[in-house]
Image: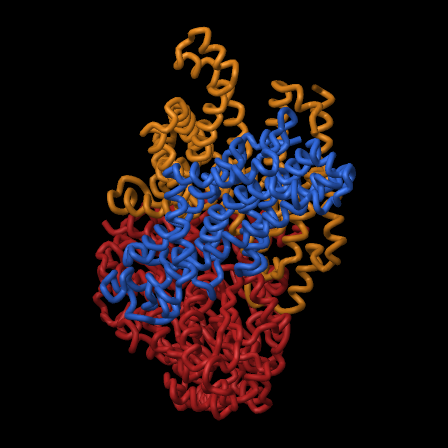
Amino acid sequence: MAREGRAAEPVTLRERAASGPGPGRPRGSDPAGARAARGSWRRFASSPVAVVGLVLTVLFVLVAALTSVIAPTDPFSFAGTPFEPPSAKHWLGTDDLGRDVGAGVVHGARTSLFVGVAVAGASLVIGTVVGGVAGFAGGKVDDLLMRLTELSQVLPRFFLALTVVALFGPGLTNMVLVLALTSWELTARVSRSGVLAVRELEYVTAAEALGSSPWRNLRTHVLPNTIAPVVALASLQVGGAILIEASLSFLGLGDPNVISWGYMLNNAQSFVRRAWWMSVFPGLAIAVAVLGVNLLGDALNDFWNPRSRSGGASA
Amino acid sequence: MRRLRLIGAILALALLAASCGDDGSDEPVSQPAEPAAEGPSAEPETAAEEPAEEPAPAAEPEPAAEPETAAEEPADEEPAAESEPAAEEPAAEDPRRGGTLVIALSDDPGHFNPGITTGFNVHAVTGSIFNGLVELDDNANPHPDLAESWDVSDDSTQYTFHLAQGVRWHDGEPLTSADVKFTFENVLLDYHSRTRGGLSGILESIDTPDATTVVFNFTQPYAALLQRLNSTEAPILPKHIYEGVDDVQTADANLTPVGTGPFKLESYDIDNEITLVRNDDYFKAGLPYLDRVVMRVIPDQNTQVLALEEGEVDYIWRVPGGDIERLGSDDSITLHNINSGPGGGFCIPTLTFNSDREVFSDLRVRQAIAHAVNRDQLVAQVLFGQGRVATGPINSQMAFAYSDDVTSYPYDVDRATALLDEAGYASGGTRFSIDLLVFSFGVFPKYAEVMRQNLAEVGIDVVVTPLDRSAFIPRVFGERDFDTNIISYCNNTDPSIGVARMYISSNIGDIPFSNGAAYINPAIDVLFDEAASTPDVARRGELYAEIQRILTAELPYLWLVETQFTAGSGANVQGLQANSGHVAETAYFEE
Amino acid sequence: MVRYTVRRLLQAVPLVFGAAVVTWILIHAAPGDPIVALAGEDGDAGYYAMMRERFGLDRPLHEQLFVYLGRLAQGDLGFSYRQNRSAVSVILDQLPATLLLMVPALAVASVIGISVGTLAAARKNSALDNTARTATLLGHAVPVFWLSQVLLLLFALRFDWFPVQGRSDARAGYEGFRALLDVGHHMVLPIAALVTVYVPPIMRVTRAAVIENLDEMYIRAARARGQSRRRVLIRHALPNAMLPIVTVIGSQIGFMFAGSVLVETVFAWPGLGRLLLSAILARDFAIITAMLLMLSVTIILMNLITDLVYSLLDPRVRHGT
């Protein structure tokens, strides 16, 4: 029962990482994990891919965090005359209403980051809870939850998001909800198998025999072993979510009250021949941000989920 | 731009050709066939439309009203199509025949029965396949189509139409008055929402004294009938095809249209293209010139423009404002400025204040918003100059009814701020927050974005909510769940059709494009009633002027701008009727 | 094996119905009225009521859902009032146009992805490997609709090599071989855009799988027996890696459709993407639900096929969890 593929998600080979019968590899014992964490950083830092990813991601997060410092003006305000090409005053030019494209790009980072992190965070929570409960409870509950997991996996994510946003009206909340509700399947599987693997290890059994509470077991043995791979998986959701948000905005389904790169690209469509800067800069911003978080997510997964390689983000 | 004049000329010629179909005989008191012929030479102003000779004065008020509109029209905008007297002669030589005209369509029509829908994309296609009793020019003046002439009784309660001779359906059957009667009684009055809404209460009966005569009897004077009879509002369908069909709306015949029009359906590739082929037996002699018309589905307007520029299509119904300047300076492209098209005319995008909302019960708030919205900016940056600031509920192009003696609300932030202070909404920060519903297509979101910033300046927080048509209409007119919204209300040919609906108290409720503000003023109700049933044009003008005075003072809505439509075509295409469904009837390719 | 297949098929049934219920409820819970789009503008209240009754839209939602599920059980996915045909036939009509882009794009992407991925794996951490990985990641990060626009601006407008829209030249009305060429000409840009988004996942998975297999014992053994590295790669590692590759292609089907929709939009290519968007605008519920459901079923089938193939190869799966 594994290897249902997932549209646009870290797919491959995960049957082995996630539920593989065979040698299922619970990640080391507790102290080993801690040591690995310390060692990880060195290994991590030695990979150029990881470093580039980290740098770009940090840059992205900084821009998003410091919008009010970098571009204090409202990105929707009429800062200049329409269609000014890039200049000293408006670095990235102005759009059809004289709004500063640079301010839009900076403020858009915040929106994209929000969407990416919200989707990843929500799917992480849902996935961990469902997977954890399934793993612990076993039996009927496990069966039911795994059915549910399968269901969430066979729903076509992009199309569902498109439909929901189009029908219920644009708004970041709707978008984040649909994406989160269709993105937790892999996380659930990984955390479930993490729980199963750890449970079967002798020391847990021994600990149980010694009378320590299940909650304590969860905290001391299970969580440390599953949290890292799950977080790594979640990091891969970020880029995908950003791209989907941009794609839906491009189709005219974005939230007009919040500046976003997708919204800017959609707006730029009407003026591609007149004002190239309106579409070039937001497009580049998306590419750089997604590249950064993907590289980082990739690197994280290389460490924590070495056998589950990402199929990458989606459009 | 010079080409525009040419187009006007061609149009005139076309109408001439059309009217030649009738022998000019008959009684026609009012709107005979000739005027079109007169048009170009007699009336330098407006090539095609002018039945210059004020049609039989007192006979019926309506037609008399229209022409004036027409005459005034071109003045301020684009000296457009008109104004070059009889230079039009180039078209006098026989236009070149043959060729395939490619027209961009923004969505698949789904079927080809124009009698059961008012959807633009259906009519954009079926306008070439079917005919109405009359065709309307760009200023809503009627010209012969299937009816070669008509008479109207003095009290405007009876209209008699004389059908053109020798008209045949695409399958060879002759057209008779029974087709007309059947179409109205079994299709239009049931399924064509506008015709149903406009005529069902007041149309008493349709008589067919002989095969080529149709008589419409009304229960009360009805002045605007002719404006409802073109191929968009009242296409005539074949009785022999639809009679006995179980269900007109789902009939197979809707996919295999049999019309009387200049073109026949050849093939239909859903969502991709629709191919029409010349009707060799068209009743207007010599027409059409083209061999084929292909309607190519291109949903995105920008792509339509690119395709036009690259010569992949020959005609697009609407050129987005942002492209007008560029296309205007492109020698290979002709722009057509028109007031109307299949779907409406004389339109005024309007901000509706929901009067159920506490905040809008205060006139000062509405006035403040009116002063705060920079409507010049809307014209300049959203419409790119293709329109003008609206002054009130009636379009300035509808000359007989329009009045500029109104309260005006120039852009004035200080005034707006003062009014809001007066109204008791504390200054500093956000005074209050409202939502603004708009259609998610076209330039509607753009109006909203400009206005959001305008209103932010005076401390009003606006949340823009774009919705598609299917969600917008029930929410605004059914649930009334909105603070403000923007709708483009089209005056449509007569204030009694397109204006009254927004203000009369009997028209509040779950009716699309009705009185969305829920504005109630008995005096206004009375005035509109009187204006609709008064035959005298001047008197009607006074009544409408009074209406405009009251409405602009009370401000239940804020009339933003008056829009114009711009269509675009390849410069090598001539004779297009850009304002009509019959766009390709007289079109041809230049040598 | 047969028993396993049957079991899996039976398991898929509730999944299909589950997906159907979820999508149906989502769509019907949304605001918006299909009648508005069906009727055009300016209908009066009576007119709307009449239309609703005709199409059963005046009945309570749960009743409509049961009616829908009942019909679904008989294989009826709904009727499109707008198109006046069964939803399935409308969708099947548009499918070839979409496949016309997807299949060639997938073929090209597979060739590129598998060959580059294998080479990169064979020379892990080489310049080639790093370049390929970076290019892949970039390909992954660029929004496909944006890339499509750039291609369009450059190659259709600036250089004028290709048409800007559509599947064929509307005016020319070519026949026979010329028509094929014409369609091919129109396909180039959209396919180029699609290839760039299809390649990355295929390449990455290929690379990963080949690396993994190269490490496996039997390959070490083979090398110990003195076979050349190249030989090992071609004879052993690649075939073993094919399975996961097939899995990606199968499992990315939703993603691939998504890319196709965006590309179709930019190039005005008449396919499923356009169908879905116009169905949404018109609240053509039958088409929307049928399309989402058909996508779900496709994903379920792909999963099933992959599972069956795996179980053939690895009996543990059959008895496993």
Q: Percent from the top left, x then y, of residue C119?
A: 38, 23
Tell me, by letter, which chain the rendering colours red. Answer: B
Quadrant assignment for the N terminus of chain B: bottom left
Could you tell me how many numbered marks the image carries? 0
Q: Percent from the top left, x then y, of residue B150?
A: 48, 70
Question: In the current view of this chain or complex, which residue is farthest to the top?
Answer: C225
Q: Percent from the top left, x then y, of residue C62?
A: 75, 54
Q: Colour of chain C?
A: orange
Identify the residue at horizontal 42%, vertical 44% (top origin). C263
Q: Percent from the top left, x then y, of residue B485?
A: 51, 73
Looking at the rendering, which quadrant does residue C104 occupy? top left
Identify the residue at horizontal 63%, vertical 70% (top origin). B478
Is B193 located above or below residue C12 in the figure? below
Looking at the rendering, which quadrant does residue A46 occupy? top left
Residue B290 relative to residue A294: left or right: left
Q: Is residue A9 visible?
A: yes
Q: Is residue B273 visible?
A: no
Nearer to us in this view, A269 or C146 = C146
Nearer to us in this view, B464 or B83 = B464
Residue B588 relative to residue B352: left or right: left
Q: How is the image coloured?
A: by chain
Identify the residue at horizontal 75%, vertical 45% (top origin). A213
Q: Colour of chain A?
A: blue
